[in-house]
Amino acid sequence: MSKIITLRKGLDINLVGKPQESLADAPQASEYALSPLDFEGVIPKLLVKVGDRVKAGTPLFFNKADERILFTSPVSGTVAAVNRGEKRKVLNVTVTPDATQEYEEFAKPDLKSASREQIVELLLKSGLWPMIVQRPYGIIADPNDSPKAVFVSAFDSAPLAPDYNFVLKAEQKNLQTGIEVMRKLTSGKVHLSVRAKAEGQMPSLQGAELHTFAGKHPVGNVGVQIHHIDPVNKGEVVWTVNVQDLAIIGRLFNEGRVDMTKIIAVAGSEIEKPHYVRMVGGAKVDSVVKGNVKKQKEGDSIRFISGNVLTGAKTALDGFMGFYANQLTAIPEGDKYELLGWAMPRFNKFSVSRAYFSWICPKKAYDLDTNMNGGERPFVVTGLYEQYLPMDIYPMYLLKACLAGDIDKMENLGIYEVTEEDFALCEFVDPSKIEIQQIIRDGINLMIREA
């Protein structure tokens, strides 16, 4: 058994609305969407127009910077719309699905004899290549690179996150194939991280080096795990894959088709019965939560989040699930203000400082809304971030280097090791209410441009 890596820093935010271990099938959505905005740094070039017929696995657009990287339809049907924003920027491509699904047929190579080039080509042609994300920078992996290792986190420690042991119970065969695919892509190791005392069936997977982690969020973040297993230095590249995406990749090699079916957690205080739902990626939100949203009082509204409350993207009932999202969270919209709220005892509010009484009851689950309780304030040195980021870097100095655009300092302070999700907790505890994740992303984008 591997040595347990215990992280002392971090914070678990205990929210109302944890998903129960029951599974339902979502009805077919009226539309499915694929959005270029889900992929960092991708400039899309369209391959379809409104009215075109597509199958599941038909390319909808490609990345202008690398024409081999295709983005394929999750369902078969008719292209319903190409939605655009300012300066005709493509926001998403939507497809109205057929009642009976048709799939593009792909080769099923024998992994023992298949070359690395064949495997890369199949992942590119099928549109599953974007599931492989590289560090540094947290962008889609470059097919020309050979990473020093591949990292997979088999658990998620974010608030209300899905339990992958439950979600992937029936996916052992696909997960095993996925690991064999990853072994072909790297000359180094495939690292699989599990949570101590909740390993499930993951240790039975062959061909991956197992690591056991214990601690609070962000212990499940793959960036934190890389930092403690084999850190990324200048000039090195590692690849990461979400464990559920690994199963979808394995399914492509086992079945020869792009089947984007996944199980997501539908959670949060505004969900009547928080549970798990089987759906096809990119589904419309209303199909996932149909009849399961609490009735609202007059004037109240709900924030739907594709992903978790710390890093997810705001969506709506008529919005869509994101490409990488494995949960849908519904919490109250924080659009109400209390008169002299700061002077109240606030028993139902959560705070990492002792301003509220939440520190007295650490096990309590909180029903939090999106209210920031104040606006942006001066950015002051508090030493607070260091208490919650379990990495050997100086987060405050790195943020200042990003704001200053000082590339040498950013390199020396660890910009290659982080992406914005690693700083999500710092943003949550930040008394200055600053958009820390955006600052880190802007710093990373500056590095990409200069490199």
Image: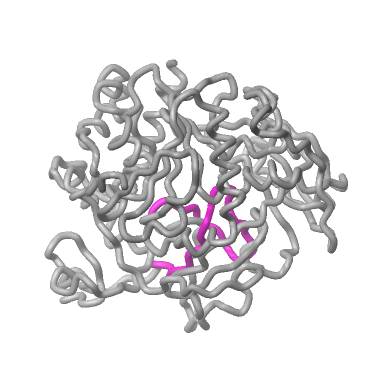
Q: Quadrant of residue 24?
A: bottom right
367 or 12, which is in the foreground?
A: 12
From this view, report whether residue 371 is shown above or below residue 301: above
Magenta segment main secondary structure: loop
Residue drawn at 54 percent across, 69 percent down: 276
- Confirm whether the magenta stretch covers residue 139: no
Horizontal and vertical percent position of residue 271: 49, 75
State which quarter of the image contains the C terminus.
top left
Left or right, 126 with reference to 416? right
Q: How many marks?
A: 0
Residue drawn at 14 percent across, 65 percent down: 355
Q: Which colour style is shown?
A: one colour
Horizontal and vertical percent position of residue 74: 71, 50
- Confirm whether the magenta stretch covers residue 323: yes
From this view, report whether residue 187 is shown above or below residue 282: above
Q: Quadrant of residue 289?
A: bottom right
Q: Quadrant of residue 223?
A: top left
Region of the chain picked out in magenta, as a range: 310-334
Left or right, 299 with reference to 212? right
Left or right, 264 with reference to 354? right
**Can I make out residue 332 in this image?**
no
Residue drawn at 27 percent across, 34 percent down: 399
Horizontal and vertical percent position of residue 72: 72, 41
Horizontal and vertical percent position of residue 438: 39, 40
384 or 116, which is in the foreground?
A: 116
From this view, report whether residue 119 is shown above or below residue 311: above
Residue drawn at 87 percent across, 47 percent down: 53
**Can I make out residue 240 in this image?**
yes
